[in-house]
Amino acid sequence: MESALCVPIFLVLCIFIQSSAHGQSLGPEPSGRRSQAVETNKTLQETKTRFLLFEDKTSKGCQIRLNRQDTLQECGFNASQPLVMIIHGWSESVQFSPSNVHLIGYSLGAHVSGFAGNYIGRKRKIGRITGLDAAGPLFEGTSPSDRLSPDDANFVDAIHTFTQEHMGLSVGIKRPIAHYDFYPNGGSFQPGCHFLELYKHIAEHGLHAITKTIKCSHERSVHLFIDSVLHDGMQSTAYMCSDMDSFSQGRCLSCRKSRCNTLGYHVRQQPQSKSKKLFLVTRAQSPFKVYHYQFKIQFVNQIEKPVEPTFTMSLLGTKEETQKIPITLSGGITSNKTYSFLITLDSDIGELIVIKFKWENSAVWANVWNTVQTIIPWGAEPCCHPGLFLKTIRVKAGETQQ
C-alpha cells in the first residue's frame, strides 16, 4: 500500500476538436466569476478547441477554459504532480495537407516547432512556422538542423525582441533563423520594459510586477504577433537593413525588391534564398504600430567652423499636425553634406503637406546666433549673407513610400 501511494498521479491535458458549429457553446459554463479578460474578448472568435483535465483513469474530464485561471482550481489542478500533455495532430487518412499547417512557437517552443517541421518535411513540408523570440542559450551557435531554420517549412518568419546579452548569453537568439527575421526596436530590448517602468507594472500586476518586468521584452514578441491579429487595419511595416544604427539614421526605408514586409500574422510569404533582417520601431503598448519618416537634409555653412544647432520640426498632414519634434545633429554641420535621420509618429497624419522648421538657441550656437544673420530660403539658393542655410529637405514616408 505504501509503494502504491508513491506512484505519481499524472494529470493529462487532452485537446479535442469539437465538431459543433462556429460560435456554439462548448458545454455548461462552470460556476465562478468571469475574468475581466474574457469580458473584454467576448466578441472575439470563440475557439472550437476543448481543453480537458483528467485527474485519474476514472475521471470524465473537467474542461479548462481559455483565460479562466479559476477553472484550473475548479478542476482540481495540482501543480505538485507531473503533467502530461496530449495534443491531437492529424492523420494522413483524412487527407489533410501539411501545407495548411501554421506552427507558432514561443522561446524554446520556436525550436520545437522547427524540429516538428523538419520531421514532417521528410515527406511534405508544412506551410509556415513563426518563431516568437526563439530561445538563445544552447542554440545561438548551432547548425540549422539543431534549431529553427528556413528549411523547416515552406515559409518561416521570426520576431526577435530580447537579444540583449547578460553574462555572455541572451534570452532570445540573435542570429537570423528564418526567411524573414524581424528585429523590433533593434531586437535587443523593448520600450516600456525597463526597470524604471516597474512602478507602472506594480499598479497593473501587483506582486507579479518584478516577474513581468524581467520577461517583458521576451514576451513582447507574443504581444506583437497578437497585435497584428487584433488590429487588422494597423499592420506594422519593417524594412530591410544591416543594423539598428543604420535604420535609426533613416538609411533603410525602401520597399523595392521585397525589402520591406508586414510584421506578424499577415506577413507576405515570400521565401528567400537568404535570410532577410528587417527593422522597425514600435510603441511601448498596443497598438504597437508607428509611422516611419526618412529625412535627408542638406545645409550650406558659410561660417568658418562646424556648428551644432538643435532644431525642432512640426509636420502638417492632411489628417492632423504633430507637435514640435526635437532634432539634434551630432558632429557639427558642414557645407554640402547630407544628414539623414529617422522620425516616427504614433498616429497617421495623412499626406505630408507642410514642414515647420525652427532653429533653437543652444549654448554652442549662442555666440554665432547673436552676430550672424541666419537665412533659411525655401527653394532658392542662399546669397548675400554669411551664415547657415537650409538648402534642401527630402522626406520619404515609409508606409506609403511617397
Image (cartoon, helix red, strand yellow):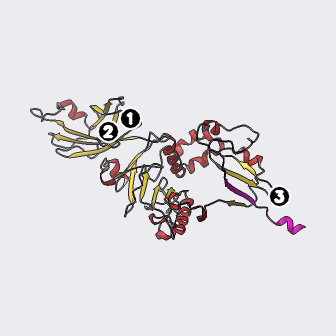
SS for tag 2? Answer: strand
Q: Is residue 369 visible?
A: yes
Asked whether 2 falls inside the magenta stretch, the response is: yes
Which callout, 2 or 3, points at the residue further toward the start of the chain? Answer: 3
| Residue 258 vertical placement versus 367 (above, below) | below
**10 Å neighbourhood of mark 2: few (<14), some, or many (≥20)?**
some
Are the residues flagged by discs 2 and 3 in contact, CB closer than 8 Å? no
Q: Can residue 360 be seen in this view?
A: no
Mark 1–mark 2 distance (CA, rounded to whole Å): 20 Å
For residue 112, what is the image quadrant? Answer: bottom right
Q: Name the residue under label 1.
A: 348
Q: Say which residue appears at 59% left-offset and 37% top-offset.
A: 43
Q: Which amino acid does label 2 sit on?
A: Ile
**10 Å neighbourhood of mark 3: few (<14), some, or many (≥20)?**
few
Which callout, 1 or 2, points at the residue further toward the start of the chain? Answer: 2
Q: Which of marks 2 and 3 is in front?
A: 3
* Coordinates of residue 111 in the picture (x, y in percent): 53, 63
Q: Name the residue under label 3.
A: 58
Mark 2–mark 3 distance (CA, rounded to whole Å): 69 Å
Mark 3–mark 1 distance (CA, rounded to whole Å): 58 Å
